[in-house]
Structure formats: structure tokens, C-alpha cells
Image (tube, rainbow, N blue to C red):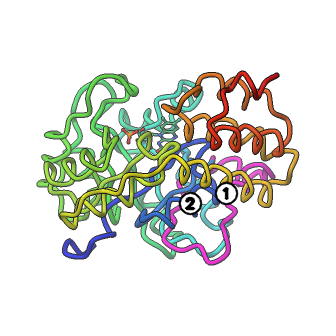
Amino acid sequence: MNKKSAGTHFILAPIAGVTDAVFRKICAERGAAFAYTEMVSAKALTYKDARTYELLRRYPGEKNTGVQLFGSEPDIIARAIGLLPEGFASIDINMGCPAKKITQNGEGGALMKNVALAAALVRAAVREAGVPVTAKMRLGWDNNMAIDFARTLEDAGAAAVTVHGRTVSQQYGGKADWDAIAEVKRALSIPVIANGDALSPEKANALLKHTGCEGVMIARGALGNPWIFEGANALFRCEAPREIPQAERLETAKAHLFAACEYYGESRAPLILRKHLAWYTKGMKNSAAMRVAFNACVTAGEMVEIIDNCKTNKEHSDIIE
Ligand SMILES: Cc1cc2nc3c(=O)[nH]c(=O)nc-3n(C[C@H](O)[C@H](O)[C@H](O)COP(=O)(O)O)c2cc1C
């Protein structure tokens, strides 16, 4: 990545249930340099599971998106890669997910306890993939052994690593250890992407600077706030981030809903959009009542009505009557 040009550093993280093609497009339009699918089961791909294949759908013209796979068997990872549709810019292997249903199968964060297997997965993926293979790791399982782990992945052929500055045992609690990420950056020759607690444009730039990494990956800070990329890019250019007016937030929420209707169909989209709409409206007047109302919506029309009422500053009590 070119450190001098703005707009190349801030990356949308893989987020299960969130980073579908619709949200990736919204973030790309607001300055995300790269994005990931949510984590996709390599095994389910080899079973030709239809819901899993849906996670691989891309929007027309989509570029700069990596697919994230999880698995624990090198041959299955390789077979899954052979089944991927064309067009993903890279393949990332999840080595950080702390969810028990994943780690109990030796997948995700459990790989932090098995560096030999993690390296074997990378080697198998590199042999099969025609694009760069990367890994998203944590600092360790319950203590920091990130440098040795990351070096082993580098030797196995990883083109880059993302380091989430927490152990798997920490899950999402406590503060991400930015010093530990910086140490990994200094120890490796391949690009390192820093991740953890870049919750605002200011923090994203601070993480970039603190670690000296090639990029910063943003997850929670982008929920309902795709403008975080625009703001981070502005700050990187030493410009003040733009204040995003409430009307623009609400218009984007509606555009997200309409795009989801096109993508998923009108019966599924409202269910999928409930959480997004709650995030877009968080912090606005009556946001708690709006969240309850969104969760009760069955149609997109009902959701639009709530958003439009919020735009005209109607009290929420008017809406639910
Ligand atoms: C709801 C949720 C879902 C996530 N799903 C994934 C995933 O599919 N793959 C992955 O590598 N990380 C996943 N993560 C972890 C994030 O990508 C990221 O590493 C973590 O949230 C720390 O970054 P942040 O402080 O910017 O949120 C998820 C996190 C959250 C909160």
C-alpha cells in the first residue's frame, strides 16, 4: 500500500451478519479501501450449502474485496478455494473467532493454540489460490505469542496478516494492545494490518500512527456509521472530518434498506435490516423506541415510515399509535 496517498489505509473488517455485498458497497462508496465478506465455512462450501454460497455474492463491479474462510483442515480449505467464484482480490483465513461453536472444532481462534496447523492451512491455501492469502489473527489464545505466530505464517507464505490486539480469551473485552500490534509490525517483512478499538476516525488514525502498520481494519466503528472511512481518510489528509447531518444518516439508512430489498427480496430484507437501522439511528432522539419499532416491522414500508417520521422530528409516540 502506498503510504502517501489517502484512501488506502482504512479497511472494513469481516463482520458476521453485517458485511454482505450491500453494506460493503455502502462503505466502499464512503472511502473504505478494502472490505471482507463475513467468515465463511470452508466445510459448508464443500457441501455446496446454498446459504453459504449466498455469503459469496458480490455487487456488480465489486473490487477490492477479500473472502474470509474458516476451517481447520488444510485439504478442505484447499477444496473450498477451488469452489470460490472468480473475482475476490484475496483469501483470508480466520484465526481469531472466539465463539465456542467455532473454537471447539479447532477453527477460528483455536488455531492460535496450534501454530503448525495454522501454517499448514496457509500453505494449502497458497498452493490452491491464484490471489494473495492472508490471515486474521489475535495476540494468542490466552497470552501474547503473536510475533512467533505471525512469523510462522509469513514463512508459510501469507501475503499479509491482520492482528487484532487481544487474546482469544479476552474476546472483545478490555483494551486492544496497540503496542503488541506494533511489535508484530516491526518483526515482519509482509504488510501488517492493525485491528482493535479503531472506533472513530481519530482512533483509526491514532492506531495507524501508533503501530506503523500498512492499514487499519475497522469493525464496530462502522456499524451504522460507514462515514467512519470518509472521516478517517480526511484526517489522514490533515483535514477535519465532515459532520454527518442526521438527514443524511437517515437517507443512507433508507438507501441501505432499498438496496437490501433488491438484493434479498422484500420479505427477507426487513429482518436483515433491523439491526442496521437501529445502529444508524443510535443516539438520535427516541432511538430506543425506534429500535423496538424496527424490530416489530415486517415490511420495508413500515420501516420507511419510522425513518420518515424521524426525519420530520415527529415524536415516536405518534408513530406507534
Ligand atoms: C458482531 C461481530 C461479528 C464479527 N465477525 C467476524 C468475522 O466474521 N470474522 C472475523 O475475522 N472477525 C469478526 N469479528 C471481529 C472483528 O472483525 C474485529 O476483529 C473486532 O471487532 C475488533 O475490531 P473493532 O475494535 O474495530 O471492532 C466480528 C466482530 C463482531 C463485533
CA separation, marks 1 and 2? 9 Å
**Residue beneath disc 2:** 26
- Residue 208 percent coordinates (x, y): 21, 54
**Residue beneath disc 1:** 255
The kind of residue tagged 2 is Ile
Q: Please report the residue visible at 35 percent of the width from the left and 62 percent of the height from the top.
A: 158
Q: Is residue 177 above or below residue 241?
A: above
Q: Are marks 1 and 2 in contact (CB under 8 Å)?
A: yes
- Residue 142 percent coordinates (x, y): 30, 24
Mark 2 crowdedness (10 Å alpha carbons): few <14, some 14-19, many ≥20:
some
Which of these two is toward me, 236 or 321? 321
Q: Secondary structure at mark 2?
A: helix
For the magenta stretch, what is the residue range?
Answer: 41-68
Which of these two is toward me, 122 or 264? 264
- Residue 163 percent coordinates (x, y): 30, 46
Residue 65 magenta-drawn?
A: yes
Q: Secondary structure at mark 1?
A: helix
